[in-house]
Image (cartoon, rainbow, N blue to C red):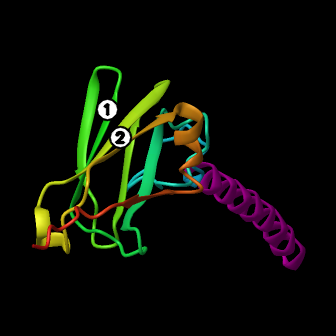
Amino acid sequence: MNKLSEKTRKILRAIYRGAGAAAFSLTLAACSPWSNYAMYGMPDMYGMPPGIQEDVLIHGYVTTKEGIPINGIAVYIKYADKSMLLRTNLNGEFYAYVEKYETFSILFTDVDGIDNGGSFIQHEITLTLEEAEALQDNPITIQLEEVPVDVE
């Protein structure tokens, strides 16, 4: 009887090892960002593999010539026949995912005047798709010039 229970234990151990290995590998596959399985929660902004993500991240900072971040600058991103409007946050940062296109025109405008520490001159840049894709790893910094104050 003792031999039978030892044999049963060995069989059960083998079954449990197999079930544990299968459960572990299925868990890894389901949680992998490269899998085609359904995922829950917010997607990882910066860690998506190239084949899955269809958009490009436009990312950067707006500062004064002295390097001080500017809050509340309107950022108009124009491409194809579409446009997107966003504003810089307290750190002067802006970011948006936009559809891939050959060129992007980005206009920086101070819409609130002196509420963000001064009035700034409007500035426009044009980015190619390759330049925009490079912003994911190296955000662009735009330095805006203050509107000259006439002193009489």
Q: Secondary structure at mark 1?
A: strand
The location of residue 70, given as percent across then percent down, is: 29, 68
Q: For residue 138, which quarter of the picture?
A: bottom right
Q: Residues within 10 Å of mark 2 (few under 14, many from 20)?
A: many
Q: For residue 6, which quarter of the picture?
A: bottom right
Q: Residue at x 44, y 53 (%)?
A: 59
Q: Nearer the viewer, residue 7 or 42?
A: 42
Q: Secondary structure at mark 2?
A: strand
Residue under label 2, please give it.
106
Main secondary-structure element of the magenta-colored stretch: helix
Type of the residue with mark 1: Lys
Q: Look at the image and say whether residue 11 sits in the magenta stretch.
A: yes
User: Is residue 128 positioned above or below 68 on the image?
Assistant: above
Type of the residue with mark 2: Ile
Residue under label 1, please give it.
78
Q: Residue at x 26, y 32 (%)?
A: 83
